[in-house]
């Protein structure tokens, strides 16, 4: 039995992005944010998320500059790290999951918090100039905001997509309200996830300004 479905990868790609642009309301967004939004919608299949995007500063320019200079990509979960396309990054750029630090479980127990929050604590000295992508744990975002308020080294950009029913809404709103002076992109509400966080990194990596909505190659 041979099912009738589209097989040509080039045509699948073309139609996918054409559908995103046709269905997502990108009016009023800055060009670079709109282009990044196209990639996020493509990653999750939900054009309606565009209305809930929030940002401060110029996260696209900041992220591109950091990655172009070999800045580290630091993630809150292995799924986000696995979703980042290394071929689009420089040879010296590292992509790491902060949970991989062997000291995380003990630190979490000591602080009475989650491993994700403890990982932020342990990796705080390495945050300077990094692209921080959070696609899972609201507690990681909360702790990042706290540590930045305490004056730790500032990342180049925060891509904040924690997901879930407990803390996701609040952590993202806390980022919006914190006025940290760090460029960020986030998605208000419960929605988020590793795929969106990884897609945001991939959209920035190696893509020239105004061309994020083009073909990945």
Image (tube, grey):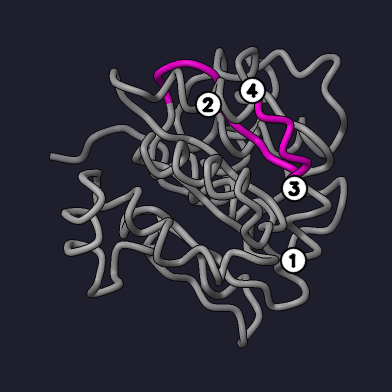
In the image shown, does 7 or 170 lie closer to the viewer? 170
State yes or no: residue 186 in magenta.
Answer: yes
Q: Which mark is residue 172?
A: 2
State the CA–CA distance, disc 4 to disc 3: 17 Å
State the CA–CA distance, disc 1 to disc 3: 16 Å
State the CA–CA distance, disc 2 to disc 3: 24 Å
Residue stretch in magenta: 178-191
Q: Is 141 situated left or right of 208 in this image?
A: left
Looking at the picture, how far across and down is residue 126, in whole percent? 55, 71
Mark with earlier residue (2, 4): 4
Q: Label 2's element?
A: helix
State the CA–CA distance, disc 1 to disc 4: 22 Å
Taking the spot 68% from the left edge, 24% from the top edge, the residue there is: 54
Residues tagged 1 and 3 counted as in contact (Cβ below 8 A)? no
Q: Mark 4 points at which residue?
A: 53
In the image shown, does 25 or 153 lie closer to the viewer? 153
Q: Label 4's element?
A: strand
Looking at the rendered image, the disc whose residue lies closer to the viewer, 2 or 1, is 2
* Quadrant of the rendered image containing residue 57: top right
Mark with earlier residue (1, 3): 1
Q: Mark 3 points at which residue?
A: 212
Looking at the picture, how far across and down is residue 120, in whole percent? 42, 56
Q: Residues within 10 Å of mark 3 (few under 14, many from 20)?
A: many
Q: Name the residue under label 1.
A: 66
């Amino acid at each position: 039995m041979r099912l009738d479905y589209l097989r040509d990868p080039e045509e699948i790609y073309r139609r996918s992005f054409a559908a995103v642009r046709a269905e997502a309301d990108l009016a009023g967004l800055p060009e670079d944010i709109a282009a990044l939004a196209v990639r996020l919608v493509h990653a999750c299949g939900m054009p309606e998320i565009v209305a809930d995007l929030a940002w401060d500063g110029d996260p696209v320019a900041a992220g591109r500059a950091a990655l172009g200079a070999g800045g580290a990509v630091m993630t809150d979960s292995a799924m986000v790290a696995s979703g980042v396309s290394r071929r689009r990054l420089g040879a010296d750029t590292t992509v790491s999951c902060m949970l991989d630090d062997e000291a995380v479980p003990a630190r979490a127990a000591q602080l009475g918090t989650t491993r994700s929050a403890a990982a932020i604590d342990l990796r705080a000295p390495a945050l300077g100039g990094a692209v921080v992508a959070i696609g899972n744990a609201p507690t990681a975002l909360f702790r990042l905001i706290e540590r930045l308020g305490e004056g730790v080294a500032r990342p180049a950009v925060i891509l904040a997509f924690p997901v879930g029913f407990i803390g996701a809404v609040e952590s993202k709103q806390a980022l919006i309200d914190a006025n940290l002076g760090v460029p960020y992109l986030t998605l208000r509400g419960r929605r988020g996830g590793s795929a969106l966080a990884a897609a945001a990194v991939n959209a920035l990596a190696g893509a020239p300004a105004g061309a994020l909505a083009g073909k990945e190659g």
